[in-house]
Each structure stands twice: as structure tokens, then as C-alpha cells.
Image (spheres, grey):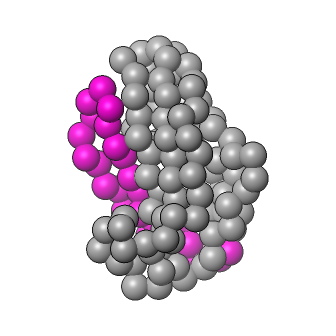
Amino acid sequence: MVSFLLFNAVKCTNLKFIFRGYFGHSVEAIRFMCDTDILMDGIGMYGGRGEYTCKIKIFDLGADGGGFEKDGMVIFVFVYIPYYCPARSIHNIMFQKAVNIVAGKWYLLWVKVSGP
């Protein structure tokens, strides 16, 4: 489950959570828009049962928000990051380079989780 976004202490409004189930290889997504430009340094992943791997994509959906991921343009991909997360804990996944998020545009943070 995507638990929160790390946004350099800037609050992001208009979060829309899209959950597609949680199985061995689940996909989770959060659709969001910010009211100020931000640099996204990473995300926090909740686990709780051991070792996981995840693939992260960020889609730019434009000002109208689009309908699906395929309507947007992929602006960031982080492929298969392994992480360990003990019970009731959050593991911070920091990006090597911050992603520029522009105010007034819709984005989709997409995460595919594999694990226990």
C-alpha cells in the first residue's frame, strides 16, 4: 500500500486514492494535483511482512486529468527496488533525482508491489 508521498514538507491537496486490490503482485496508485510546484524526493511504502520489491512510475495526466494511465505521459520510472519492511513500519524509497511536479496538473503515482 502506498502510505504517503514525500514532498519536501509541502502539503499536496486533491489526493485521490485508487486501490486495485492487494495480492502477491498488486498495483496501487494515487492520483494527485498540487497547488504549488514541488520536487518529489521519494515515497513511503508500507509493508509489514518482510521483503518486497516494487516498480514505480509517475504519469503526467495534464490539466484535465485524463481517464487512465495510458492517457498520460510517463515522466519517471524506478525499476524493481528491493526493500524490507517490518510490521507496522514504513520504508522510505528515495529517488536518485527529484521529480518536478508542476502546480495545476494531475499526476498518477503507480506502484507495482511484489512480496509476501
Question: Is 6 located above or below residue 93 in the figure?
Answer: below
Residue 104 forms part of the magenta stretch: no
- Left or right position of 37 against 115: right
Q: Residue at x 28, y 34 (%)?
A: 22
**Residue 71: in sight, yes or no?**
yes
Q: Position of residue 81 (x, y in %)?
A: 58, 32
Q: Residue at x 49, y 17 (%)?
A: 51
Is 113 or 3 nearer to us in this picture?
A: 113
Q: Residue furthest right?
A: 97
Question: Is 21 located above or below residue 48 in the figure?
Answer: below
Instruction: Please give the range of residues in magenta.
Output: 12-37
**Residue 45: in sight, yes or no?**
no
Residue 25 forms part of the magenta stretch: yes
Q: Residue at x 26, y 30 (%)?
A: 23
Quadrant for the C terminus in the image: top left
The answer to which quarter of the image holds residue 83 is top right
Q: Position of residue 5 (x, y in %)?
A: 56, 51
